[in-house]
Image (cartoon, rainbow, N blue to C red):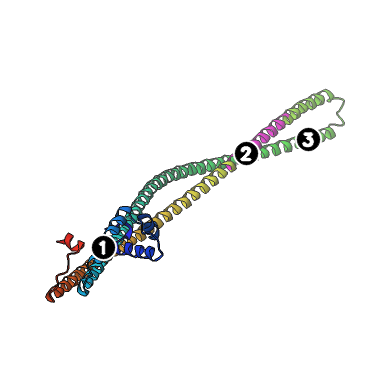
Amino acid sequence: MARGGINKAVVQKARTALLARGEHPSIDAVRIELGNTGSKTTIHRYLKELEATELARGKAPLGLSEQLANLVNQLAEQMQEEAQASVAEERAALARERLEHQSRLLQAQENIRQLVVQNTDLAEQLQASQEALQQERLQRQNAEVDNARLLQMQADQELRIGERDEQIRLLEGNHQHARDALEHFRQASKEQREQEQRRHEAQVQQMQIELRTLQQSLVVRQDEITQLHRDNARLLAEAQQQRKEWMTQQRQLEERERTLADSQQVLVRAEQDNGVLQERCNALRAEANRLGEKLTAQEQHVRGLLERLAEANTQLKSVGHVPPKHEGEASQS
């Protein structure tokens, strides 16, 4: 059988066209006439067969039955070659589709493997996120405990500050009472000023010493109050910083949960694509079965043509003419 669909009838048609144009039907000329297709060896063999046939016709004219038998043989050979070429093309197309299907199946399996790896990675990331979340929750609980402790310390300090303010007010009241008592004492002892001047001056000095002591105590307590206010401000700043860190960790946790949700959606879409590829695989298998059935039908058709050819030969034999054996029949026998 000639490659690329080249057969004896096609070569004969190209040779006849060249002769009609007055050109010599060489191998290269016939191949160019066929569109630069076909093997030169096959074309040379067909040209020799055609020349031998023409020489045989030139020596002895053939009868109508012999011409009819040759025509039937040529048609049968052409139909058989065309059927074989069609079957070969169908088989080649089926093989290409099978290779394409296998390539798609391998690609789908690779995609599934990658998705499985991604799913494993996402599961590990989810486990790590959950552990980090648990750790962050523990840290948040510890921060809340520390915050409550700091608030309690702040409340205690405010209570102590209030107590110290009350002590300061009492000291100021005592100081005022001392001043009032001094003034009263001055008014009461005005008549005896000269007699008790020394005792009075001693008492005044003592009171001034007590006053300076009270003022120094007041300054110390004011310094302690200022320090307490500073400590309170520092504790409030630390509490605010911890609250900011907790809010940042909460946002990171929400972002990780959203990332996990997106990864789960990607996995669902991959499973859907796998289902579509499986349906395509089933469709390709059905198409392969259909092509097999078509090939079987074409083979049955060829066998029918051969049977018809045998019946035609039998009829020719019955009318007293034995057709010469064709090259195709000789190869079949």
Of the residues shown, which amino acid type is indicated by label 1?
Leu
Mark earlier in primary sequence (2, 3) = 3
Which residue carries the number 1 mark?
55
Q: Image height check: is 104 above or below 164?
A: below
- Principal secondary structure, stretch drawn in magenta: helix
Mark earlier in primary sequence (1, 3) = 1
Q: Image height check: is 217 above or below 300?
A: above
Which of the 4 quarters of the picture holds residue 295? Answer: bottom left
Mark 1: secondary structure: helix
Going by the image, does 40 lie left or right of 333? right
Query: Dot 3, how many residues are within 10 Å of its Cα: few (below 14), some (14-19), or many (20+)?
Result: few
Residue 116 coordinates in the image, percent (x, y): 36, 49
Which residue carries the number 3 mark?
181
Does residue 196 belong to the magenta stretch?
A: no
Real-space CA distance between mark 1 and mark 3, rounded to the nearest whole angstrom: 165 Å
The boundaries of the magenta stretch are 216-239
Residue 104 coordinates in the image, percent (x, y): 35, 54
Real-space CA distance between mark 1 and mark 2, rounded to the nearest whole angstrom: 125 Å
Of the residues shown, which amino acid type is indicated by label 2?
Asn
Mark earlier in primary sequence (1, 2) = 1
Going by the image, does 191 lie left or right of 327? right
Which residue carries the number 2 mark?
232
